[in-house]
Image (spheres, rainbow, N blue to C red):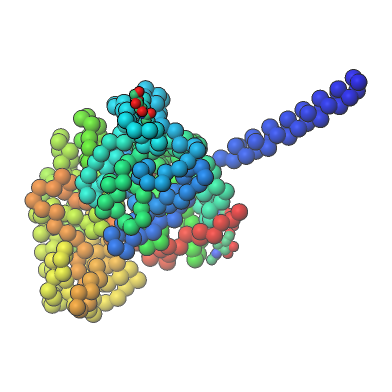
Amino acid sequence: MACFYRYHLNFFSLLLLLHLSLTSAASSFRPNALVLPVSKDPNTLQYTIKLTQRTPPVSVPLTLHLGGQFLWVDCDKKYVSSTYRPARCNSAQCSLANSKSCGTCNSSPRPGCNNNTCGLFPDNPFTNTATIGDLSSDLVRVASTNGSNPGRVVSMPHFLFTCAPTFLLQGLANGVQGIAGFGRTKISLPSQFSSAFSFARKFAICLSSSGVVFFGDGPYTFLPRDEEVSSRLTFTPLIINPVSTAGATVAGEPSSEYFIGVTKIKIGEKEVAVNKKLLSIDSEGNGGTKISTVNPYTVMQSSIYKAVSDFFVKYVGDIPRVKAVAPFTVCYGPRSFSSTRAGPGVPAIDFVLQNDKVYWRMFGMNSMVQVNDDVYHLCLGFVDGGKSPRTAIVIGTYQLEDNFLQFDLARSRLGFTSSLLFLQTTCANFNFTSSV
Ligand SMILES: *[C@@H]1O[C@H](CO)[C@@H](O)[C@H](O)[C@H]1NC(C)=O
Ligand SMILES: *[C@@H]1O[C@H](CO)[C@@H](O)[C@H](O)[C@H]1NC(C)=O
Ligand SMILES: *[C@@H]1O[C@H](CO)[C@@H](O)[C@H](O)[C@H]1NC(C)=O
């Protein structure tokens, strides 16, 4: 009897041990980085990612908003999940999200409609609309990466997001169910992933019609020659705009968008005279330069736009211009420029940063846009932002394509590469074949 008891106990502890070691093996896998593919929607020119969320899992298409505060999704349509949880008022989740409101809902409970739940203001920067929605959490799964391939899929059981009503989707790419905010907040996608897996507070975006985003530090390796781009970065400080630039704002909140300190603009290495006052951020949060995935083309305050366009036209000289195609004003016919590795052979445009030696150089593929309007045009890809826009220069996605950008939140700096074409690769060259 004693013998049996002992045997039983040992067998049981063996099982228990086995179980413990298996679960700890599973949870001890800690990724250093995560990876997701990015696509470009041809109609809206928005960049989209797909996040696997809920139980059972659903692949949720989302528009990427670099400066967005958090993830929001449409909870009104077909949100079914056994792991959905509303964030209770005064919980740690509400304070992490910096929520100041506590809401109720008069119909029967469902995702996005709960009593005693704290709220945030989801916004759609494409239509300048904002509303209020329940802070919530649900399971999210993402592929880890060693920098060369996607690896094991890891999960976060309580990923925070905000529920929004269906109307907030207006103006977003077809099929998209929300916005993925990568901004400077504690609950943006990069912040939540970094704290959940205790990896570097860095993320990187590389935009093209089929690009990639990474959460965490490098290596970031691109085919065909295993080019590791984190060793190719030039750094500039990220600047905090003390005044929020979001659709609905809480007084005193800084902007969650990413600003950099452009101090000069050069074309063909010659300085363009612009009003320097516009290039810094004033006490009301106006002026300065930000990077945005909301604008398809770089937008410049009128006087800067005019100075840059006039300088470019003069620099290019005798090449005849053709009728402009809106929203552009400076266009040339086909075969106006030679063809180079990095697009049409036009003078390079430099955004000079903290000193003359640090600049972000744009070549023809990022400055000239092909427009087909009866005839083939090649237009200078900047847009006039009017006399008094909030931000003087908004660097848009056309100028970011095939440039690798790393946002280092801990050190508050941006690493950038200029055109990857000079490294004989592109943002479409991450090897998405899984290694598991
Ligand atoms: C919230 O509470 C009110 C009043 O008790 C109740 O009528 C309503 O159904 C509740 N709503 C939800 C979503 O539980
Ligand atoms: C992509 O990665 C897979 C898995 O590691 C590998 O088998 C394949 O050869 C890689 N593709 C290229 C083009 O190197
Ligand atoms: C990542 O994993 C793949 C597949 O196991 C391997 O071929 C590759 O060399 C690894 N890359 C790095 C940077 O460790």
Residue 372 sits above or below residue 202 on the image: below
Q: Is residue 329 left or right of residue 411?
A: left
Which of 104/289 is in front?
104
Which of 115/385 is in front?
115
Q: Position of residue 369 (x, y in %)?
A: 24, 67
Q: Which quarter of the rendering shows the C terminus?
A: bottom right
Ligand 2 occupies quarter? bottom right
Q: Position of residue 418 (x, y in %)?
A: 33, 58
Q: Which quarter of the rendering shows the N terminus?
A: top right
> Can you see residue 355?
no
Q: Is residue 284 left or right of residue 157?
A: left
> Can you see residue 283?
yes
Quarter of the image holding residue 195?
top left
Q: Position of residue 192 (x, y in %)?
A: 43, 37
Residue 107 sits above or below residue 35 on the image: above
Q: Position of residue 162 (x, y in %)?
A: 35, 38
